[in-house]
Amino acid sequence: MEYEPILPLKAIVFQALFLMVAVTIEAGIFRQRLLLGFKTSVQYATAVNLAAVVAGWILFLVLEPLSPPQIKSQIISYILFDRLLINGWTAEVGASLLAIGFIAFFATFYIKQEGLKLFLLSDDAWVIPKDPEKLSRRQRYAHARQGRSQTQAALSNFTDAVILANAASFSAILVLLLLRVVAQEWR
């Protein structure tokens, strides 16, 4: 028995829509928080999101054949036919999907953070400030009162910006998915 190749056109269209939403949101946050130019922030957001999508699809295509039959049938039903099989829904499937969601969020965050760090450092657009070697007594006291050095503050602001951008784009995509379900129910 031969299988016909199936092109999940609806999944591809929604992936493109979600990419546009994520790039728009993350570019705005990168521009505001990391003080990048408009064009630069859009380019960086596009590059890191495409890297995350490619890594995600590669991981999905490797792990999907290894998944249990219940999850595999849910995946195929959702991607190809745009519906979840409620009768096959068990607590294990729900817990697995929730765990996959958390893993996807943090893996995407890591890919975006490392990719953005690589782009910023290679373009010399972002330089990690170094602590001065000799500080006066007042400067040491001021640093001790702040609780962190300039280097730690710069890295913290960078990490905060990336996690905020990732969380905002994931939230917007989740809202779009929920609106899509609600719109389908109203038909």
Image (tube, rainbow, N blue to C red):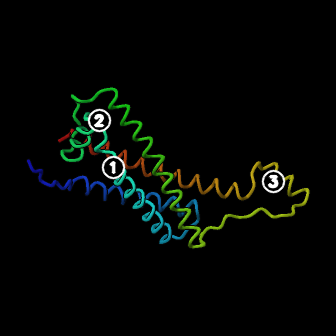
Q: Earlier in the sequence, mark 1 or mark 3?
A: 1
Callout 1, which amino acid? Val
Categorize mark 2 by other alpha carbons within 10 Å: few (<14), some (14-19), many (20+): few
Q: Is residue 21 visible?
A: no
**Which residue position is annotated with label 3?**
143
The residue closer to the viewer here, 76 or 18, is 76
Instruction: Give the residue number, with chain letter if any, for mark 2.
Output: 68
The mark found on residue 148 in the picture is: none
Q: Position of residue 106 (x, y in %)?
A: 48, 46
Q: Quick one: 128 or 34, which is closer to the camera? A: 128
Q: Is residue 109 above or below residue 42?
A: above
Q: Position of residue 1 (x, y in %)?
A: 8, 47
* Measured Cα–Cα span from mark 1 to mark 2: 13 Å
- State which mark lies toward you, 1 or 3: 1
- Residue 62 marker: 1
Q: Quadrant of residue 136?
A: bottom right
On the rendered structure, is 183 left or right of 52?
Answer: left
Mark 2 is on which residue type? Pro
Describe the element under mark 2 as helix, strand or loop. Answer: loop
Check disc 3 and give the amino acid type. His
Element type where label 3 sits in the image: helix
Q: Residue 65 appears at what percent x and percent y? A: 28, 44
**Mark 1 burial class by Cα count in 10 Å: few <14, some 14-19, many 20+:** few
* Residue sitting at x 26%, y 39%: 72
Residues at discs 2 and 3 in contact (Cβ within 8 Å): no
Please tell me whether mark 1 sits on a helix, a strand or a loop.
helix
Q: Position of residue 37 (x, y in %)?
A: 53, 70
Which circle's residue, 2 or 3, is located before the other in the chain? 2
Counting residues from the start of the chain, the first of labels 1 and 2 encountered is 1
Residue at image coords 75%, 55%: 149
Between the residue at mark 2 and the residue at mark 3, the CA separation in whole angstroms equals 54 Å
